[in-house]
Image (cartoon, grey):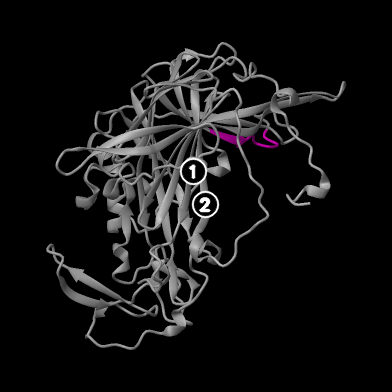
Protein backbone atom coordinates (compact mmCIF):
# COMPACT_ATOMS: atom_id res chain seq x y z
CA UNK A 1 0.00 0.00 0.00
CA UNK A 2 0.99 3.65 -0.36
CA UNK A 3 0.68 6.02 2.58
CA UNK A 4 1.80 9.14 0.74
CA UNK A 5 -0.11 11.17 -1.84
CA UNK A 6 3.05 11.42 -3.94
CA UNK A 7 2.62 9.19 -6.99
CA UNK A 8 6.21 7.90 -6.77
CA UNK A 9 6.07 7.00 -3.08
CA UNK A 10 7.60 3.59 -2.36
CA UNK A 11 4.69 1.18 -1.95
CA UNK A 12 7.13 -1.72 -1.46
CA UNK A 13 7.76 -0.17 1.97
CA UNK A 14 4.28 -1.23 3.13
CA UNK A 15 3.56 -4.80 2.02
CA UNK A 16 0.05 -5.87 3.02
CA UNK A 17 -0.46 -9.04 5.04
CA UNK A 18 -3.37 -10.21 2.90
CA UNK A 19 -3.49 -11.68 -0.60
CA UNK A 20 -6.44 -11.63 -2.99
CA UNK A 21 -7.30 -14.51 -5.32
CA UNK A 22 -9.02 -13.41 -8.53
CA UNK A 23 -10.65 -15.20 -11.45
CA UNK A 24 -10.15 -14.47 -15.14
CA UNK A 25 -12.79 -11.71 -14.95
CA UNK A 26 -10.70 -9.91 -12.29
CA UNK A 27 -13.24 -10.61 -9.57
CA UNK A 28 -11.99 -11.42 -6.09
CA UNK A 29 -12.97 -14.97 -5.13
CA UNK A 30 -11.05 -15.35 -1.87
CA UNK A 31 -8.83 -13.35 0.44
CA UNK A 32 -5.98 -15.04 2.29
CA UNK A 33 -3.98 -13.99 5.34
CA UNK A 34 -0.26 -14.21 4.61
CA UNK A 35 2.10 -16.02 7.00
CA UNK A 36 3.82 -13.87 9.61
CA UNK A 37 6.14 -16.04 11.72
CA UNK A 38 8.37 -18.84 10.45
CA UNK A 39 5.87 -21.54 11.47
CA UNK A 40 2.81 -19.74 10.03
CA UNK A 41 0.90 -20.96 7.02
CA UNK A 42 -1.33 -19.11 4.61
CA UNK A 43 -5.01 -19.42 5.52
CA UNK A 44 -8.27 -17.95 4.29
CA UNK A 45 -9.01 -14.60 5.87
CA UNK A 46 -12.12 -14.53 8.03
CA UNK A 47 -13.02 -10.93 7.26
CA UNK A 48 -11.87 -9.50 10.55
CA UNK A 49 -8.43 -8.99 11.92
CA UNK A 50 -6.19 -6.95 14.11
CA UNK A 51 -5.62 -3.29 13.42
CA UNK A 52 -2.70 -2.10 11.35
CA UNK A 53 0.42 -1.85 13.49
CA UNK A 54 1.23 1.85 13.22
CA UNK A 55 4.80 1.19 14.32
CA UNK A 56 5.30 0.09 10.73
CA UNK A 57 4.90 3.69 9.55
CA UNK A 58 8.46 4.83 9.11
CA UNK A 59 10.72 7.26 7.30
CA UNK A 60 13.83 6.40 5.33
CA UNK A 61 12.12 4.15 2.77
CA UNK A 62 11.59 6.74 0.06
CA UNK A 63 13.83 6.99 -3.00
CA UNK A 64 12.31 9.80 -5.06
CA UNK A 65 14.18 13.15 -4.86
CA UNK A 66 10.95 14.97 -3.97
CA UNK A 67 10.71 12.90 -0.79
CA UNK A 68 14.36 13.09 0.27
CA UNK A 69 15.32 15.23 3.24
CA UNK A 70 19.06 15.29 2.49
CA UNK A 71 21.06 15.65 -0.71
CA UNK A 72 24.84 15.75 -1.10
CA UNK A 73 26.42 18.93 -2.39
CA UNK A 74 30.01 17.68 -2.57
CA UNK A 75 29.97 16.16 -6.06
CA UNK A 76 31.26 18.43 -8.82
CA UNK A 77 30.07 18.08 -12.45
CA UNK A 78 31.72 15.33 -14.52
CA UNK A 79 31.58 15.79 -18.27
CA UNK A 80 32.75 13.42 -20.99
CA UNK A 81 33.89 15.46 -23.98
CA UNK A 82 35.13 14.24 -27.37
CA UNK A 83 36.03 17.45 -29.24
CA UNK A 84 36.43 15.63 -32.57
CA UNK A 85 33.34 13.48 -32.09
CA UNK A 86 33.15 9.74 -31.46
CA UNK A 87 35.37 7.17 -33.17
CA UNK A 88 32.53 4.87 -34.21
CA UNK A 89 30.70 4.96 -37.56
CA UNK A 90 27.09 3.80 -37.90
CA UNK A 91 25.01 2.94 -40.96
CA UNK A 92 21.56 1.70 -39.98
CA UNK A 93 22.24 -1.10 -37.50
CA UNK A 94 25.83 -1.63 -38.69
CA UNK A 95 28.59 -0.35 -36.38
CA UNK A 96 32.26 0.02 -37.27
CA UNK A 97 34.62 0.93 -34.46
CA UNK A 98 38.38 0.48 -34.33
CA UNK A 99 38.77 -2.98 -35.96
CA UNK A 100 35.32 -4.20 -34.94
CA UNK A 101 32.38 -4.66 -37.27
CA UNK A 102 29.00 -5.78 -35.91
CA UNK A 103 25.26 -5.36 -36.19
CA UNK A 104 22.78 -4.38 -33.48
CA UNK A 105 19.50 -6.25 -33.14
CA UNK A 106 16.56 -5.89 -30.78
CA UNK A 107 13.41 -7.89 -30.14
CA UNK A 108 10.56 -7.94 -27.64
CA UNK A 109 11.86 -10.92 -25.64
CA UNK A 110 15.66 -10.82 -25.56
CA UNK A 111 16.03 -7.07 -25.97
CA UNK A 112 19.52 -6.20 -27.22
CA UNK A 113 21.17 -8.78 -29.51
CA UNK A 114 24.54 -8.64 -31.32
CA UNK A 115 25.10 -10.15 -34.77
CA UNK A 116 27.86 -10.88 -37.32
CA UNK A 117 30.79 -9.84 -35.15
CA UNK A 118 34.19 -9.62 -36.82
CA UNK A 119 37.56 -8.15 -35.84
CA UNK A 120 39.99 -6.91 -38.47
CA UNK A 121 38.03 -8.78 -41.13
CA UNK A 122 37.98 -12.11 -39.26
CA UNK A 123 34.75 -13.69 -38.06
CA UNK A 124 34.50 -14.31 -34.33
CA UNK A 125 30.81 -14.57 -33.30
CA UNK A 126 27.60 -15.09 -35.25
CA UNK A 127 25.15 -14.03 -32.50
CA UNK A 128 25.35 -12.96 -28.84
CA UNK A 129 22.28 -12.55 -26.65
CA UNK A 130 20.83 -12.93 -23.18
CA UNK A 131 18.71 -16.05 -23.53
CA UNK A 132 16.87 -16.10 -20.21
CA UNK A 133 16.76 -14.76 -16.66
CA UNK A 134 15.20 -16.70 -13.79
CA UNK A 135 14.53 -15.18 -10.37
CA UNK A 136 13.40 -17.83 -7.83
CA UNK A 137 12.66 -16.78 -4.25
CA UNK A 138 13.69 -18.92 -1.28
CA UNK A 139 10.85 -18.36 1.20
CA UNK A 140 9.14 -21.76 1.30
CA UNK A 141 6.00 -20.56 3.12
CA UNK A 142 2.91 -20.54 0.90
CA UNK A 143 2.18 -18.59 -1.29
CA UNK A 144 5.76 -17.35 -1.73
CA UNK A 145 7.02 -20.37 -3.74
CA UNK A 146 4.97 -18.85 -6.57
CA UNK A 147 7.51 -16.01 -6.70
CA UNK A 148 9.72 -17.34 -9.47
CA UNK A 149 9.78 -15.25 -12.63
CA UNK A 150 11.34 -15.80 -16.04
CA UNK A 151 11.94 -12.13 -16.65
CA UNK A 152 12.58 -12.68 -20.37
CA UNK A 153 10.23 -15.58 -21.13
CA UNK A 154 7.34 -14.29 -18.99
CA UNK A 155 7.79 -10.52 -19.23
CA UNK A 156 10.16 -9.70 -22.08
CA UNK A 157 13.34 -7.64 -21.88
CA UNK A 158 12.57 -5.71 -25.05
CA UNK A 159 9.04 -4.58 -24.18
CA UNK A 160 10.24 -3.49 -20.73
CA UNK A 161 13.24 -1.51 -22.03
CA UNK A 162 13.70 2.04 -20.76
CA UNK A 163 13.78 5.16 -22.89
CA UNK A 164 17.38 6.09 -22.07
CA UNK A 165 17.98 9.72 -21.17
CA UNK A 166 20.85 11.85 -22.40
CA UNK A 167 23.29 12.72 -19.63
CA UNK A 168 21.83 10.15 -17.21
CA UNK A 169 21.89 6.55 -18.40
CA UNK A 170 24.83 7.08 -20.76
CA UNK A 171 27.50 9.81 -20.79
CA UNK A 172 29.46 11.37 -23.62
CA UNK A 173 28.79 11.36 -27.36
CA UNK A 174 25.75 9.11 -27.64
CA UNK A 175 24.07 7.34 -30.53
CA UNK A 176 20.64 5.94 -29.69
CA UNK A 177 18.91 3.04 -31.40
CA UNK A 178 15.13 2.77 -31.55
CA UNK A 179 13.21 -0.48 -31.88
CA UNK A 180 9.71 -1.52 -32.82
CA UNK A 181 7.16 -3.83 -31.23
CA UNK A 182 3.51 -4.25 -32.11
CA UNK A 183 0.23 -3.63 -30.31
CA UNK A 184 -2.36 -6.38 -29.80
CA UNK A 185 -4.11 -5.15 -32.93
CA UNK A 186 -0.92 -5.45 -34.97
CA UNK A 187 -0.03 -1.78 -35.20
CA UNK A 188 3.69 -0.87 -34.98
CA UNK A 189 4.79 0.52 -31.64
CA UNK A 190 8.00 2.54 -31.54
CA UNK A 191 10.33 1.92 -28.59
CA UNK A 192 12.53 5.02 -28.48
CA UNK A 193 16.16 5.15 -27.30
CA UNK A 194 16.22 1.54 -26.06
CA UNK A 195 19.94 1.08 -26.83
CA UNK A 196 22.71 3.62 -26.35
CA UNK A 197 26.07 3.39 -28.08
CA UNK A 198 29.04 5.32 -26.74
CA UNK A 199 32.74 5.13 -25.89
CA UNK A 200 34.27 4.96 -22.43
CA UNK A 201 37.74 5.27 -21.01
CA UNK A 202 38.59 1.92 -19.43
CA UNK A 203 41.86 2.59 -17.66
CA UNK A 204 45.24 1.38 -18.87
CA UNK A 205 45.22 -1.01 -21.83
CA UNK A 206 48.89 -1.89 -21.64
CA UNK A 207 52.04 -0.33 -20.16
CA UNK A 208 55.72 -1.02 -19.65
CA UNK A 209 58.48 0.95 -17.94
CA UNK A 210 61.99 -0.01 -18.92
CA UNK A 211 63.69 -0.04 -15.52
CA UNK A 212 67.08 0.37 -17.20
CA UNK A 213 66.17 3.69 -18.83
CA UNK A 214 63.13 4.60 -16.69
CA UNK A 215 61.24 5.30 -19.93
CA UNK A 216 57.55 4.42 -19.78
CA UNK A 217 55.13 3.67 -22.61
CA UNK A 218 51.45 3.62 -21.71
CA UNK A 219 48.30 3.18 -23.75
CA UNK A 220 44.89 3.86 -22.33
CA UNK A 221 42.01 1.54 -23.10
CA UNK A 222 38.92 2.71 -24.95
CA UNK A 223 35.81 0.52 -25.04
CA UNK A 224 32.69 0.68 -27.15
CA UNK A 225 29.58 0.20 -25.02
CA UNK A 226 26.17 -0.97 -26.21
CA UNK A 227 23.77 -0.69 -23.30
CA UNK A 228 20.10 -1.26 -22.58
CA UNK A 229 18.17 -0.95 -19.31
CA UNK A 230 14.96 -2.76 -18.43
CA UNK A 231 12.47 -2.38 -15.60
CA UNK A 232 10.69 -5.57 -14.54
CA UNK A 233 8.21 -4.51 -11.85
CA UNK A 234 10.47 -3.71 -8.89
CA UNK A 235 13.94 -4.43 -10.32
CA UNK A 236 16.06 -2.66 -12.92
CA UNK A 237 18.68 -4.53 -14.93
CA UNK A 238 21.44 -2.82 -16.93
CA UNK A 239 22.79 -5.00 -19.75
CA UNK A 240 25.89 -3.86 -21.64
CA UNK A 241 28.22 -5.36 -24.24
CA UNK A 242 31.77 -3.96 -24.07
CA UNK A 243 34.15 -4.22 -27.03
CA UNK A 244 37.78 -3.30 -26.41
CA UNK A 245 40.82 -2.63 -28.58
CA UNK A 246 42.48 -5.94 -27.70
CA UNK A 247 39.69 -7.91 -29.47
CA UNK A 248 37.94 -8.81 -26.20
CA UNK A 249 34.19 -8.74 -25.57
CA UNK A 250 32.66 -8.44 -22.13
CA UNK A 251 29.03 -8.73 -21.09
CA UNK A 252 28.14 -6.77 -17.99
CA UNK A 253 24.95 -7.11 -15.98
CA UNK A 254 24.05 -4.71 -13.19
CA UNK A 255 21.04 -5.24 -10.94
CA UNK A 256 19.45 -2.35 -9.09
CA UNK A 257 15.95 -1.11 -8.22
CA UNK A 258 13.77 -2.05 -5.26
CA UNK A 259 13.68 -5.47 -3.66
CA UNK A 260 10.39 -7.36 -3.72
CA UNK A 261 9.15 -7.40 -0.12
CA UNK A 262 6.93 -9.48 2.18
CA UNK A 263 5.15 -8.35 5.37
CA UNK A 264 6.52 -9.31 8.77
CA UNK A 265 5.41 -8.34 12.30
CA UNK A 266 7.51 -5.84 14.23
CA UNK A 267 10.36 -7.58 16.12
CA UNK A 268 9.83 -10.86 14.20
CA UNK A 269 12.49 -12.63 12.13
CA UNK A 270 12.49 -15.55 9.69
CA UNK A 271 15.54 -17.49 8.44
CA UNK A 272 14.80 -16.90 4.73
CA UNK A 273 15.04 -13.12 4.57
CA UNK A 274 16.36 -9.86 6.00
CA UNK A 275 14.27 -7.26 7.80
CA UNK A 276 15.20 -4.02 6.03
CA UNK A 277 12.64 -1.64 7.59
CA UNK A 278 9.88 -1.89 10.22
CA UNK A 279 7.46 -4.57 9.03
CA UNK A 280 9.38 -5.10 5.76
CA UNK A 281 11.04 -8.42 4.93
CA UNK A 282 13.30 -8.74 1.87
CA UNK A 283 13.37 -12.48 1.15
CA UNK A 284 16.42 -14.43 -0.02
CA UNK A 285 16.41 -15.15 -3.76
CA UNK A 286 18.62 -15.79 -6.78
CA UNK A 287 19.11 -14.08 -10.13
CA UNK A 288 20.26 -16.59 -12.76
CA UNK A 289 21.09 -15.50 -16.30
CA UNK A 290 21.79 -17.55 -19.41
CA UNK A 291 24.13 -15.93 -21.93
CA UNK A 292 23.81 -17.54 -25.36
CA UNK A 293 27.08 -17.51 -27.33
CA UNK A 294 26.93 -18.56 -30.98
CA UNK A 295 30.56 -18.65 -32.16
CA UNK A 296 32.00 -18.35 -35.63
CA UNK A 297 35.73 -18.55 -34.94
CA UNK A 298 37.08 -18.01 -38.46
CA UNK A 299 34.14 -20.07 -39.70
CA UNK A 300 31.14 -22.05 -38.48
CA UNK A 301 32.94 -25.35 -37.72
CA UNK A 302 34.02 -24.97 -34.09
CA UNK A 303 34.74 -27.17 -31.06
CA UNK A 304 34.77 -26.75 -27.29
CA UNK A 305 38.05 -27.49 -25.54
CA UNK A 306 38.15 -27.83 -21.74
CA UNK A 307 41.56 -27.09 -20.23
CA UNK A 308 42.68 -27.57 -16.63
CA UNK A 309 45.91 -26.74 -14.79
CA UNK A 310 47.37 -29.40 -12.50
CA UNK A 311 50.48 -29.59 -10.35
CA UNK A 312 53.12 -32.09 -11.42
CA UNK A 313 53.85 -34.92 -8.97
CA UNK A 314 56.64 -34.18 -6.47
CA UNK A 315 59.39 -36.71 -5.72
CA UNK A 316 58.04 -39.01 -8.40
CA UNK A 317 60.96 -40.67 -10.23
CA UNK A 318 58.94 -40.80 -13.45
CA UNK A 319 58.37 -37.04 -13.54
CA UNK A 320 61.04 -34.35 -13.63
CA UNK A 321 59.92 -31.89 -10.95
CA UNK A 322 62.82 -31.71 -8.47
CA UNK A 323 61.76 -28.41 -6.88
CA UNK A 324 58.08 -29.34 -6.63
CA UNK A 325 56.92 -26.20 -8.40
CA UNK A 326 56.00 -27.49 -11.84
CA UNK A 327 52.53 -27.65 -13.31
CA UNK A 328 51.04 -28.44 -16.67
CA UNK A 329 47.67 -28.52 -18.38
CA UNK A 330 45.28 -31.24 -19.48
CA UNK A 331 43.06 -30.74 -22.50
CA UNK A 332 39.94 -32.50 -23.71
CA UNK A 333 37.68 -31.68 -26.61
CA UNK A 334 33.98 -32.24 -25.96
CA UNK A 335 32.49 -34.74 -28.39
CA UNK A 336 28.75 -34.62 -27.61
CA UNK A 337 26.19 -32.16 -26.29
CA UNK A 338 26.57 -31.89 -22.53
CA UNK A 339 26.54 -29.74 -19.41
CA UNK A 340 29.75 -28.72 -17.63
CA UNK A 341 30.68 -26.92 -14.42
CA UNK A 342 33.33 -24.41 -13.44
CA UNK A 343 36.18 -25.50 -11.16
CA UNK A 344 38.33 -22.83 -9.56
CA UNK A 345 40.65 -25.43 -8.03
CA UNK A 346 41.86 -26.48 -11.51
CA UNK A 347 41.39 -23.11 -13.25
CA UNK A 348 39.07 -24.94 -15.63
CA UNK A 349 38.90 -22.97 -18.88
CA UNK A 350 36.40 -23.27 -21.72
CA UNK A 351 37.85 -22.52 -25.16
CA UNK A 352 35.85 -22.19 -28.36
CA UNK A 353 38.36 -23.29 -31.00
CA UNK A 354 38.67 -23.88 -34.72
CA UNK A 355 40.61 -27.13 -35.03
CA UNK A 356 41.08 -26.54 -38.76
CA UNK A 357 43.30 -23.46 -38.29
CA UNK A 358 46.50 -23.48 -36.21
CA UNK A 359 48.26 -20.45 -34.78
CA UNK A 360 51.60 -19.94 -36.51
CA UNK A 361 53.38 -19.20 -33.23
CA UNK A 362 51.86 -21.63 -30.72
CA UNK A 363 50.95 -24.41 -33.14
CA UNK A 364 47.60 -24.76 -31.38
CA UNK A 365 44.07 -24.15 -32.73
CA UNK A 366 42.89 -20.55 -32.82
CA UNK A 367 40.07 -19.69 -30.46
CA UNK A 368 38.27 -17.54 -27.91
CA UNK A 369 37.94 -18.48 -24.26
CA UNK A 370 35.03 -17.91 -21.93
CA UNK A 371 35.96 -16.09 -18.73
CA UNK A 372 32.91 -16.97 -16.59
CA UNK A 373 31.28 -15.11 -13.77
CA UNK A 374 31.66 -17.68 -10.99
CA UNK A 375 28.26 -18.19 -9.41
CA UNK A 376 26.28 -20.53 -7.23
CA UNK A 377 23.84 -22.55 -9.29
CA UNK A 378 20.13 -23.01 -8.59
CA UNK A 379 19.48 -23.86 -4.92
CA UNK A 380 16.01 -25.32 -5.45
CA UNK A 381 15.87 -29.13 -5.21
CA UNK A 382 16.33 -30.92 -8.57
CA UNK A 383 12.83 -32.43 -8.22
CA UNK A 384 11.19 -29.06 -7.55
CA UNK A 385 9.05 -27.25 -10.09
CA UNK A 386 11.61 -24.42 -10.10
CA UNK A 387 14.40 -26.79 -11.15
CA UNK A 388 12.31 -28.62 -13.74
CA UNK A 389 11.30 -25.33 -15.37
CA UNK A 390 14.79 -23.78 -15.31
CA UNK A 391 17.05 -26.63 -16.35
CA UNK A 392 19.83 -24.25 -17.37
CA UNK A 393 20.28 -23.26 -13.70
CA UNK A 394 21.79 -26.64 -12.79
CA UNK A 395 25.14 -26.10 -14.56
CA UNK A 396 27.40 -23.20 -15.48
CA UNK A 397 28.16 -24.22 -19.08
CA UNK A 398 26.18 -26.06 -21.74
CA UNK A 399 27.22 -26.90 -25.28
CA UNK A 400 24.70 -27.86 -27.96
CA UNK A 401 24.56 -28.24 -31.71
CA UNK A 402 23.09 -25.20 -33.45
CA UNK A 403 19.44 -25.52 -34.48
CA UNK A 404 17.22 -22.79 -35.89
CA UNK A 405 14.81 -21.33 -33.33
CA UNK A 406 16.65 -22.77 -30.31
CA UNK A 407 17.24 -19.38 -28.72
CA UNK A 408 15.85 -19.78 -25.21
CA UNK A 409 17.44 -21.78 -22.41
CA UNK A 410 14.08 -22.62 -20.80
CA UNK A 411 12.13 -23.09 -24.00
CA UNK A 412 9.72 -21.09 -26.07
CA UNK A 413 6.77 -20.86 -23.67
CA UNK A 414 7.88 -20.42 -20.06
CA UNK A 415 4.43 -19.34 -18.86
CA UNK A 416 3.02 -22.76 -19.81
CA UNK A 417 6.09 -24.82 -18.96
CA UNK A 418 5.97 -27.51 -16.29
CA UNK A 419 9.54 -28.51 -17.12
CA UNK A 420 11.11 -31.60 -18.60
CA UNK A 421 10.24 -30.77 -22.20
CA UNK A 422 12.22 -28.06 -23.96
CA UNK A 423 14.93 -26.83 -21.59
CA UNK A 424 18.60 -27.41 -22.35
CA UNK A 425 18.83 -30.68 -20.43
CA UNK A 426 15.69 -32.02 -22.10
CA UNK A 427 16.99 -31.09 -25.56
CA UNK A 428 20.30 -32.84 -24.96
CA UNK A 429 18.61 -35.94 -23.54
CA UNK A 430 16.30 -36.18 -26.53
CA UNK A 431 19.04 -36.23 -29.18
CA UNK A 432 22.67 -36.25 -27.84
CA UNK A 433 24.25 -34.86 -31.00
CA UNK A 434 27.94 -34.47 -31.74
CA UNK A 435 29.49 -31.03 -31.23
CA UNK A 436 33.09 -31.51 -32.34
CA UNK A 437 33.99 -29.51 -35.44
CA UNK A 438 30.35 -28.55 -35.86
CA UNK A 439 28.15 -25.44 -35.79
CA UNK A 440 27.74 -25.18 -32.00
CA UNK A 441 26.27 -22.92 -29.33
CA UNK A 442 27.68 -22.28 -25.85
CA UNK A 443 25.33 -21.29 -23.01
CA UNK A 444 26.74 -19.77 -19.81
CA UNK A 445 24.70 -19.72 -16.60
CA UNK A 446 25.74 -17.04 -14.12
CA UNK A 447 24.18 -14.74 -11.58
CA UNK A 448 24.01 -13.92 -7.92
CA UNK A 449 22.58 -15.45 -4.77
CA UNK A 450 20.97 -12.37 -3.30
CA UNK A 451 20.67 -12.46 0.48
CA UNK A 452 19.59 -8.84 1.03
CA UNK A 453 21.43 -6.26 3.11
CA UNK A 454 19.86 -3.33 4.90
CA UNK A 455 22.22 -1.15 2.84
CA UNK A 456 20.27 -2.20 -0.26
CA UNK A 457 17.12 -0.46 0.98
CA UNK A 458 15.14 1.41 -0.31
CA UNK A 459 16.96 1.17 -3.65
CA UNK A 460 19.93 -1.15 -3.95
CA UNK A 461 23.31 0.03 -5.27
CA UNK A 462 24.10 -1.86 -8.46
CA UNK A 463 25.25 -5.47 -8.11
CA UNK A 464 27.70 -6.00 -10.97
CA UNK A 465 28.40 -9.24 -12.83
CA UNK A 466 30.83 -9.63 -15.73
CA UNK A 467 31.45 -12.35 -18.34
CA UNK A 468 34.25 -12.03 -20.91
CA UNK A 469 35.25 -13.61 -24.22
CA UNK A 470 38.97 -13.30 -24.90
CA UNK A 471 41.04 -14.36 -27.91
CA UNK A 472 43.34 -17.27 -27.13
CA UNK A 473 46.06 -17.92 -29.72
CA UNK A 474 43.82 -16.22 -32.27
CA UNK A 475 46.45 -13.60 -33.14
CA UNK A 476 50.21 -13.77 -33.57
CA UNK A 477 50.86 -11.02 -31.05
CA UNK A 478 48.99 -8.52 -28.85
CA UNK A 479 46.34 -7.10 -31.24
CA UNK A 480 46.40 -3.78 -29.38
CA UNK A 481 50.05 -2.97 -30.13
CA UNK A 482 48.99 -0.43 -32.75
CA UNK A 483 46.70 1.58 -30.45
CA UNK A 484 47.85 5.19 -30.09
CA UNK A 485 50.17 5.91 -27.15
CA UNK A 486 48.62 8.09 -24.46
CA UNK A 487 49.87 11.66 -24.34
CA UNK A 488 49.02 14.72 -22.28
CA UNK A 489 48.75 16.75 -25.48
CA UNK A 490 45.78 14.63 -26.58
CA UNK A 491 44.17 13.91 -23.21
CA UNK A 492 44.57 17.36 -21.63
CA UNK A 493 44.44 16.29 -17.98
CA UNK A 494 44.44 19.04 -15.36
CA UNK A 495 46.35 19.35 -12.11
CA UNK A 496 44.15 20.00 -9.06
CA UNK A 497 44.98 22.71 -6.56
CA UNK A 498 44.86 21.04 -3.16
CA UNK A 499 42.92 23.95 -1.66
CA UNK A 500 40.07 23.29 -4.10
CA UNK A 501 40.14 19.49 -4.11
CA UNK A 502 36.62 19.19 -2.79
CA UNK A 503 35.07 21.50 -5.37
CA UNK A 504 34.79 24.56 -3.12
CA UNK A 505 37.24 27.26 -2.10
- Note whether 470 is above or below 484 in the view shown: below
**Does 311 appear in magenta?**
yes
Residue 115 placement, left or right of 323? left
Q: Is residue 383 visible?
A: no
Magenta part of the chain: 308-316
Q: Quadrant of the N terminus?
A: bottom left
Category of crowding for the residue at label 2, using alpha-carbon neighbours closer than 10 angstroms: few (below 14), some (14–19), many (at least 20): some
Q: Position of residue 481 (x, y in %)?
A: 65, 18
SS category of the residue bearing label 2? strand
Query: Which numbered tag is attached to residue 462?
Result: 2
Q: Which mark is residue 115?
A: none
Between the C-alphas of marks 1 and 2, the distance is: 13 Å
Badge 1 element: loop
Q: Residue furthest left?
A: 25
* Drawn side of residue 283 relative to residue 415, left or right: right
Q: Give the left or right position of residue 393, taking residue 469 as reference.
A: left
Taking the image as drawn, is residue 259 in sight? Answer: yes
Name the spot of residue 188 as percent of width and height, x first: 22, 36
Q: x%, y% of residue 62? A: 48, 66
> Nearest the camera: 251 or 25?
25
Q: Earlier in the sequence, mark 1 or mark 2?
A: 1
| Residue placed under numbered mark 1 in the picture | 169
Amino acid sequence: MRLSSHKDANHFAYPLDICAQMNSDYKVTKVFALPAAESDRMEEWGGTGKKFDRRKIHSGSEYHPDLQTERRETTTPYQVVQPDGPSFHIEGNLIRWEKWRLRVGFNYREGLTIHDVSYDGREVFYRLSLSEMFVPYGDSRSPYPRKAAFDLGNNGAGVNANNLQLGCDCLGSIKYFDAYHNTLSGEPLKLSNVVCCHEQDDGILWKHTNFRTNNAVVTRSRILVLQTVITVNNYEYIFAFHFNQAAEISYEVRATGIMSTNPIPIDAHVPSGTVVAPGVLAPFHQHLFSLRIDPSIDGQKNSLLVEESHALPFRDPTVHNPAGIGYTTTKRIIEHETALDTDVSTARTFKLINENILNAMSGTPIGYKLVPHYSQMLLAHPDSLHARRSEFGAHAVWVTRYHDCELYASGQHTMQSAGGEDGLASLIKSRDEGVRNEDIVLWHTFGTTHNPRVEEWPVMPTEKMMVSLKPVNFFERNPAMDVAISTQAANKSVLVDGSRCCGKA
